[in-house]
Amino acid sequence: MKAIVITTPGGPEVLQLQDVEDPKLGDDDVLIRVHATALNRADTFQRQGSYPPPNGASPYLGVECSGTIQSLGINVSRWKIGDQVCALLPGGGYAEKVAVPAGQVLPVPSGISLRDAASFPEVACTVWSTIFMISRLSQGETLLIHGGSSGIGTFAIQIAKYRGVRVFVTAGSEEKLDFCKSIGADVAINYKTHDFVAKVKEETGGQGVDVILDCMGASYYQRNLDCLNFDGRLFIIGIQGGVTAEVDLRPLVAKRLTVQGASLRNRSVENKAAIISEVEKNVWPAIAEGKVKPLVYKTFPLSEAAEAHRLMESSQHIGKILLVP
Ligand SMILES: NC(=O)c1ccc[n+]([C@@H]2O[C@H](COP(=O)([O-])OP(=O)(O)OC[C@H]3O[C@@H](n4cnc5c(N)ncnc54)[C@H](OP(=O)(O)O)[C@@H]3O)[C@@H](O)[C@H]2O)c1
């Protein structure tokens, strides 16, 4: 098959389409003929050599895909050959074929094209498993999402609104803020021109938000603690703003805050299957109702993966970027 190979760690130019061996099918796996895969910010870190794939995972990029099931491991009973599906992958999506544990596979949501279905597994599983399953974000609460126009952010806005949450976002341009509002954000803050802590306090009568979904890490740690409400929950899923911070812990103690972090990719197969099952139960109906839409900014042929990485690293995109073999 053809796959995008990282020829050596480095810039987007190191990504090359090459002939490689087909993936091996385990007894609990399905083999998917890939129709589309989606970029994630972590792919750019893996390409640079700073985010290696977990043990046993495909060496190729790509943590989600959509496609058609081509063959089945002997223990697989839920799926059959020819089923149109999407899947959360440990890696290997930037290819014509990928093998994945059957428990990480989902049906294409009703009303969604096979191509656009590739935009959902990673964002749905990340957002659902963090702020909903762990932080227990509930109807009537407030949520601040950093990077509101990202793949993660645009999904989080939509599913939080669907669940009756008041949504605040940060983003770095007026165009991105307007887009976030157009898909449901109640309060959109330009982090380049405004202090998000002051804006959150002003909009919440001084209280702060109940939950924060954070992709910045160290650079926002103190300000995140400062703008949480009593019993607030900070969920850190990204460290784009660094890994080391010195913080004043008084807000943590005084406001009974919880700080949590998680990475989806290094969870066990069983743990991922449990998340997939919750996502199918809780998120897929919202997509089928048209309340959560696939937001695809641009689609590239797989052979142009380098161009797609350049676009992601330019941060011009809003929502997801897809690759089609
Ligand atoms: N832990 C996990 O399991 C997991 C899973 C998936 C994703 N993630 C993380 O989630 C984040 C989003 O991923 P993605 O794939 O959706 O990437 P993406 O579309 O490339 O988004 C990156 C976002 O970071 C925002 N950003 C950069 N500097 C910022 C700042 N100072 N303040 C607020 N926002 C800022 C950008 O906003 P502007 O363009 O407006 O600057 C952009 O929206 C990444 O950090 C990624 O590593 C974690």
Image: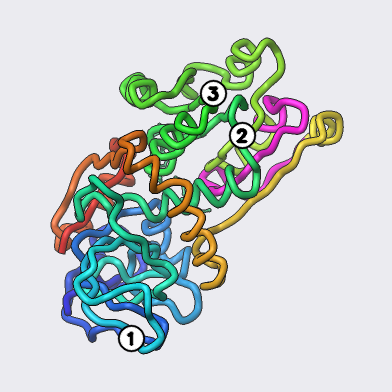
Of labels 3 and 2, earlier in sequence is: 2
The answer to whether residue 238 is magenta is yes
Q: Amino acid at mark 3?
A: Arg
Residue occupying the point 24% across, 52% down: 322
Q: Earlier in the sequence, mark 1 or mark 2?
A: 1
What amino acid type is highlighted by mark number 2?
Ser
- Distance in Å between CA atoms under marks 3 and 2: 10 Å
Of residue 261 and residue 303, the one placed in the foreground of this image is 261
Q: Is residue 289 above or below residue 66?
A: above
Which residue is at a point 34% across and 85% down the rendered structure image? Answer: 73
Q: Quadrant of residue 159?
A: top left
Q: Residues within 10 Å of mark 2 (few under 14, many from 20)?
A: some
Image coords of residue 83 (percent x, y): 23, 68
Residue ID at (28%, 63%) = 85
Q: Quadrant of residue 298?
A: top left
Q: Circle 2 sits in a helix, a strand or a loop, which is it?
A: loop
Q: Which residue is mark 2?
A: 138
Q: Nearer the viewer, residue 180 or 306?
A: 180
Residue stretch rendered in magenta on the structure: 224-247
Question: Which is closer to the viewer, label 1 or label 2?
Answer: 2
Q: Residue at x 48, y 60 (%)?
A: 277
User: Where's ligand 1: which quadrant?
Assistant: top left
Looking at the rendered structure, the secondary structure element under dot 3 is strand
* Left or right: 108 in relation to 216: left
- To which residue does mark 1 refer? 25
Q: Cα distance, mark 1 to mark 2?
A: 40 Å
* Quadrant position of residue 43: bottom left
What number is the disc on residue 166? Answer: 3
Q: Give the mark nearest the N terminus, 3 or 1.
A: 1
Residue 71 visible in the current orientation: yes
Question: In the rendered image of this protein, does residue 235 appear above or below residue 21?
Answer: above
